[in-house]
Image: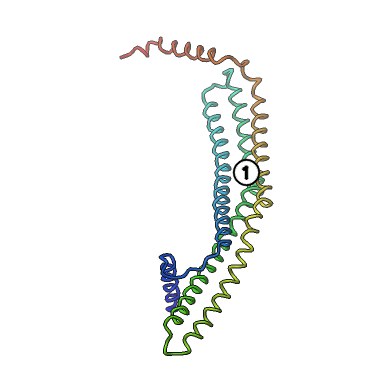
């Protein structure tokens, strides 16, 4: 940073402190402040949405991957001739198909219709924030110049040219600030209002993606129902499990001290 740049930043910091403590008149624009507040709220929500959308994608991948690991482990429990052995193979094939479908859906359709559009929308926010920072710097420069003019009016300098120069500088800074302020005040609402038309298709894509995954999972796993006995009541399953545990307790090895 150059020396002049350092001095300018130092002056702005001083002006900011003085205006916050009431030692310096501060220019305020309630309309801009309200639009900036709405934009900041939108920014936070979109960034959170993008993060959660990526989290959903990763969660589905983790879930289908875990299903496949469970199926691989179950498959190792049975000998080739065991009655349930073929069912373990069928289950492994089914969840393997689900995992591949999920990978294809999330890596192509979901990314294209959900993650990338939301990410592109959020990518404009840093540029808008930078424009807001430039506007705020112009405001600090203008307030400092106004303060300088006021001091020269209240306590005239022996140099009669100081006040006209200060007024000229203040007017130039006022025009620069007002131009940038007006532009942002006009455009920030458009950015906030654009969220509906931009995010609606992504929201629709999220719902359709979840529906498609749920339907595929149901249809694939429903095909395995024929390989299992008819559904039983919960107490029947518990009784069967207790019976097996009792048989294990009766084994001589369980009585060894």
Q: Is residue 207 left or right of residue 136?
A: right
Closer-to-camera residue (136/174): 174
Q: Position of residue 169 (x, y in %)?
A: 52, 81
Q: Is residue 69 left or right of residue 210?
A: left
Quadrant in the picture for residue 78: top right
Q: Residue at x 55, y 53 (%)?
A: 41
Quadrant in the picture for residue 233: top right
Closer-to-camera residue (3/237): 3
Query: Where is 57 relative to 238, above or below?
Result: below
Closer-to-camera residue (227/63): 63
Query: Where is 23 relative to 51, above or below?
Result: below
Q: Residue at x 54, y 21 (%)?
A: 79
Query: Where is 26 relative to 119, above or below?
Result: below
> Which residue is under mark 1?
106
Q: Residue at x 54, y 52 (%)?
A: 44
Query: Where is 54 relative to 74, above or below?
Result: below
Q: Residue at x 53, y 69 (%)?
A: 134
Q: Secondary structure at mark 1?
A: helix
Q: Residues within 10 Å of mark 1 (few under 14, many from 20)?
A: many
| Quadrant location of the C terminus in the rendered image | top left
Q: Position of residue 150 (x, y in %)?
A: 46, 78
Q: Position of residue 104 (x, y in %)?
A: 64, 42
Q: Position of residue 220 (x, y in %)?
A: 66, 29
């Amino acid at each position: 940073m150059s020396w002049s740049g350092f001095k300018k930043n130092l002056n702005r910091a001083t002006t900011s402190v003085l205006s916050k403590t009431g030692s310096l008149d501060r220019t305020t624009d309630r309309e801009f402040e309200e639009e900036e507040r709405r934009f900041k709220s939108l920014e936070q929500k979109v960034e959170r949405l993008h993060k959660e959308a990526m989290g959903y994608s990763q969660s589905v991948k983790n879930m289908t991957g875990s299903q496949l690991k469970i199926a691989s482990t179950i498959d190792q429990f049975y000998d080739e001739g065991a009655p349930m052995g073929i069912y373990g193979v069928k289950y492994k094939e089914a969840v393997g198909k689900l995992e591949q479908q999920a990978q294809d859906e999330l890596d192509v359709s979901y990314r294209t219709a959900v993650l990338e559009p939301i990410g592109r929308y959020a990518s404009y926010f840093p540029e808008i924030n930078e424009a807001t920072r430039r506007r705020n710097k112009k405001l600090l420069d203008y307030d400092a110049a106004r303060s300088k003019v006021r001091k020269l009016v209240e306590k005239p300098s022996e140099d009669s040219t100081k006040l006209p120069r200060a007024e000229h500088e203040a007017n130039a800074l006022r025009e620069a600030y007002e131009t940038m302020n007006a532009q942002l005040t006009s455009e920030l609402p458009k950015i906030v209002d654009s969220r509906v038309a931009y995010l609606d298709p992504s929201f629709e894509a999220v719902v359709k993606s979840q529906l498609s995954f749920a339907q595929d999972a149901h249809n694939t796993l429903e095909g395995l129902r024929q390989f299992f006995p008819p559904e039983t009541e919960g107490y029947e399953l518990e009784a069967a499990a207790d019976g097996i545990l009792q048989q294990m307790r009766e084994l001589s090895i369980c009585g060894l001290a």
